[in-house]
Image (cartoon, coloured by chain):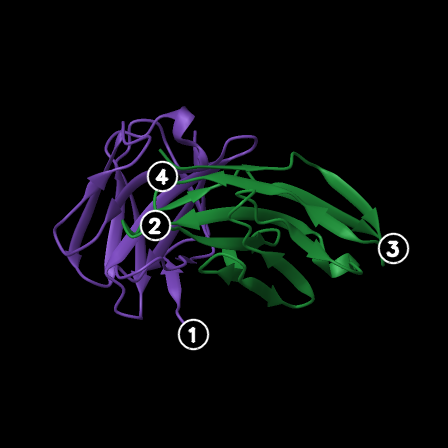
Chain colours: A purple, B green
Amino acid sequence: DVKVTQSSRYLVKRTGEKVFLECVQDMDHENMFWYRQDPGLGLRLIYFSYDVKMKEKGDIPEGYSVSREKKERFSLILESASTNQTSMYLCASSLLAGNQPQHFGDGTRLSIL
Amino acid sequence: GNSVTQMEGPVTLSEEAFLTINCTYTATGYPSLFWYVQYPGEGLQLLLKATKADDKGSNKGFEATYRKETTSFHLEKGSVQVSDSAVYFCALSTNAGKSTFGDGTTLTVKP
C-alpha cells in the first residue's frame, strides 16, 4: 500500500513565523500535491509538483511556497504565517501516467496564533 | 475547465437505510471518476473508481456507475451502518495528473 506521511498531525505557530510542513511518500510517485481543507470550502489546491524541482501553482498559492529536492519529499512553506492560514493541510501523491487516483496523508492541523 | 458538483449535505440516515449521494461532472476529454471517503481526523481514502463509460466501481458495499450520457457518478449503498459516517468526496482526474474534487457530503448514520 502507498503510504503518505505528514510530519506533524497538529502544529501551533505564531503570526510571522516561517512554517515548514513536510510530506514523504514511499511509492515513487511523480506527482505530489498540497491542499488546504476548510469547513464549507472543500479541498483547495495550493501547489503541486510533477517532478523533482518542478512546481506549479494551484488555486490559492498566495502566501505559500514549496520545495521538492527529492522525489519522495514535498515541503510546504508558509513564508510569514498569518491567522488566516489556520487550517487543515493535506498532502497527496499520484502516478503521472493516466488518470490515477491520489493517495493522501492524514493531514496536519495547523493553528496560527 | 473541469468541475464536480455533488449533493449538498449534511445527510442523516438511520442504520440500514439506503444511501444515494449524487455527483455530476463537467470535463474535457475522458476523465476517470472516483469516490473518496474521509473519516474524522484522517485524510481522504480512495473508496472506489471507474475509468470509462458504463464501468461500475464497487467497494465495501458501495457502488457507483460512470454514466457518460448524464455525466454522473452517483454513490449508492443498500444498507448503511453507523461506521459509514464520514465525509464523501466525488472527484475526477484527467491525463494532466491533477484531480478536481467536489465540496464533500457529510453523512451521519444513527443507530
**Which of pointers 2 and 1 indicates the residue nearer the eye?**
2
Please determine if labels 4 and 1 lie on a single subunit.
yes
The chain to which mark 4 is attached is A
Please determine if labels 2 and 3 lie on a single subunit.
yes
Which element carries disc 4, helix, strand or loop? strand
> Is residue A106 in sight in this rendering?
yes
Q: Which mark is residue B42?
A: none
Q: Which residue is mark 2?
A: B94
Which element carries disc 3, helix, strand or loop? loop
Question: What is the spatial separation of the Cα atoms under label 2 and label 4, in whole angstroms?
Answer: 16 Å
Q: Quadrant of residue B28?
A: top left
User: What amino acid is labelled 2 in the image?
Assistant: Thr
Residue pictured at 61% horizontal, 54% vertical: B39
The chain to which mark 1 is attached is A
User: What amino acid is labelled 1 in the image?
Assistant: Asp
**Which of pointers 2 and 3 indicates the residue nearer the eye?**
2
The chain to which mark 3 is attached is B
Q: Is residue A79 left or right of residue B93?
A: left
Quadrant placement of the C terminus of chain A: top left
Question: What is the spatial separation of the Cα atoms under label 2 and label 3, in whole angstroms?
Answer: 39 Å
Quadrant placement of the N terminus of chain A: bottom left
Query: Could you tell me how many numbered marks the image carries?
Result: 4
Q: Is residue B84 left or right of residue B79?
A: left
Q: Mark 3, residues whose alpha carbon is within 10 Å: few (<14), some, or many (≥20)?
A: few
Q: Which residue is mark 1?
A: A1
Q: Mark 1, residues whose alpha carbon is within 10 Å: few (<14), some, or many (≥20)?
A: few
Question: What is the spatial separation of the Cα atoms under label 3 and label 1, in whole angstroms?
Answer: 32 Å
Q: Which residue is mark 4?
A: A45
Which element carries disc 2, helix, strand or loop? loop
Q: Which mark is residue B111?
A: 3
Please determine if labels 2 and 1 lie on a single subunit.
no
